[in-house]
Amino acid sequence: MKQFVRFNHDGEVVFGQITPQGVHRISGPPFFDYQPGEKVGQLEDLELCPPVQPGKVVCVGLNYRDHAHESGADVPGEPIIFLKPTTSVIGPQDPIRYPPQSGRVDYEAELAVVIGREIFCPDPVDARRAIFGYTCANDVTARDLQRKDGQWTRAKSFNSFCPLGPVLNYDVDLADRSIEARLNGKLQQSSDVGQMLFDVDELVHFCAQVMTLYPGDVILTGTPAGVGPMHPGDVIEVSIEGFGTLSNRVISSREDPK
């Protein structure tokens, strides 16, 4: 498995590859041809950004049976998809802003699929080849607004409502990797990605029959049971086995993020 990061370096955002010796800058995004460059430091010393800056974020609802049950929803017969705007994307350690319009904001731990090549209307084999890698995600949701509106766009779209990271993992065997969420250190969600109703190949195939997917686009694959509310001052952590931990603090809309 290869691992990549995206980080601030001398005033610009660049990509790097994690090696046993540290992080080496690379020329361009990892899903195109790139050349390894200078060592820029150790991972813990870098100011990380989202591992990709997607052109779009396609999300899948109710993709775990236990989450459908806790939501009081029927188990879907095919993937339910919706979009998050790119303005919702933030990286590890960036703050999640609690919007003043909402009285309940929930965490949702998810596996994120990162697309590596342009694809539209493929067969299932092409769908597998279009996947570059994976990272951790949090599909933050204003739950009260979701229920009020009767649809998901506003509730899922606030700035900072799509944390991604910390690293982009390439050449991965998912193999039922565990997925967890911890709120202030307390375990809230615990499952494995093998429990998804529709696996990643099916999801990419389904989405690519609707819209063209481009390198860097992201598909969030749904959340298991255990979603719940967060409040300003809380720290939410999403972990996927072998992928690291995505950590973000919740702040009020009036709070200075620094």
Image (tube, rainbow, N blue to C red):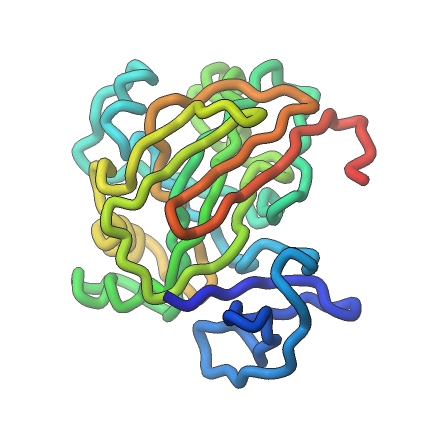
Q: Residue 177 placed where, x, y %?
A: 30, 45
Q: Which quarter of the rendered picture does the N terminus lie within?
A: bottom left
Residue 219 is at least partly visible in this image: no
> 46 or 76: nearer the eye?
46
Q: Which quarter of the rendered picture does the C terminus lie within?
A: top right
Q: Is residue 96 above or below residue 75?
A: below
Q: Quadrant of residue 188?
A: top left
Q: Residue at x 74, y 27 (%)?
A: 253
Q: Residue at x 71, y 28 (%)?
A: 251
Q: Residue at x 54, y 58 (%)?
A: 51
Q: Residue 195 placed where, x, y %?
A: 23, 36
Q: Residue at x 61, y 14 (%)?
A: 103
Number of disc labels? 0
Please give left or right for residue 172 compared with residue 198 in the image. right
Please give left or right for residue 140 compared with residue 112 in the image. right
Q: Residue 46 placed where, x, y %?
A: 68, 60
Please give left or right for residue 11 compared with residue 31 in the image. right
Q: Is residue 204 above or below residue 220?
A: below
